[in-house]
Amino acid sequence: MELSQEEADRFRHMPKDFDSVNAIDLSNIGVGLVFPAMSHDLKERFLIDIWQAKIKLSKWRHQERVRKTIPLMRLEIDGSPHINRNVSQEDIERVRTEYGWPFALKLEGTHIHVYIENYGDRWAFPVSIFPDLQKAIDSQPINYARIIAAFLKECNFSQIPPFVQGIVHG
């Protein structure tokens, strides 16, 4: 299912909260976690995915989805390089003009995917398009709970539940 850019932006900026999450337990994250959420107007359902690799423990993925299957944003931490393929110059200019976001053909390691009309989540951008998220990623020592909280704020969650960290290596 395709969204218009207007719809995707509206969903991304829509205030939302988790259905019933008392805490996010990061101690056994290798299985991947999925949390249902709802818009404040109770009209739209969302899912938040949190995943950590089992071998390369510094590799994480956080994703916001709408209507079960449509990714709006996906943060990939310490992931494989991403190449933006089959991109028209017209669409690059549209994104630069509308959002002021830089465009790179290839991104190394950590990057963020944002839904773009006609491309879905296939485009990636430097995380620096979201300064607070970039700051959380750059902070030392690395704190994955802080990064997830910053991602959720970019997804426009009103309330961020506490985190149970257990042993989380990265």
Image: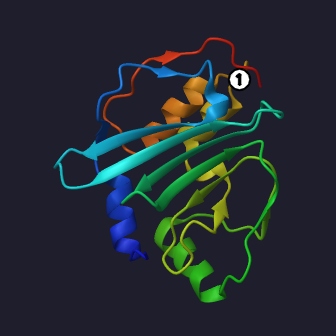
- Residue 108 on image: x %, y %: 82, 54
Q: Quadrant of the N terminus?
A: bottom left
Give the residue drawn at x 68%, y 68%.
Answer: 103
For this view, does 145 lie left or right of residue 35? right
Give the residue drawn at x 82%, y 57%.
Answer: 81
Above or below residue 151? Residue 28 is above
Residue nearer the viewer, 104 or 148? 148
Task: Please identify the residue farthest to the top as the structure is shown.
Answer: 166
> Which residue is labeled 1 in the image?
142
Q: Residues within 10 Å of mark 1 (few under 14, many from 20)?
A: some
Task: Please identify the residue farthest to the left as the structure is shown.
Answer: 41
- Residue 157 on image: x %, y %: 35, 38
For this view, does 60 lie left or right of residue 55? left
Give the residue drawn at x 49%, y 18%.
Answer: 163
- Identify the image quadrant of residue 148: top right
Q: How is the image coloured?
A: rainbow
Residue nearer the viewer, 92 or 165? 165
Residue nearer the viewer, 32 or 168? 32
Above or below residue 67? Residue 77 is above
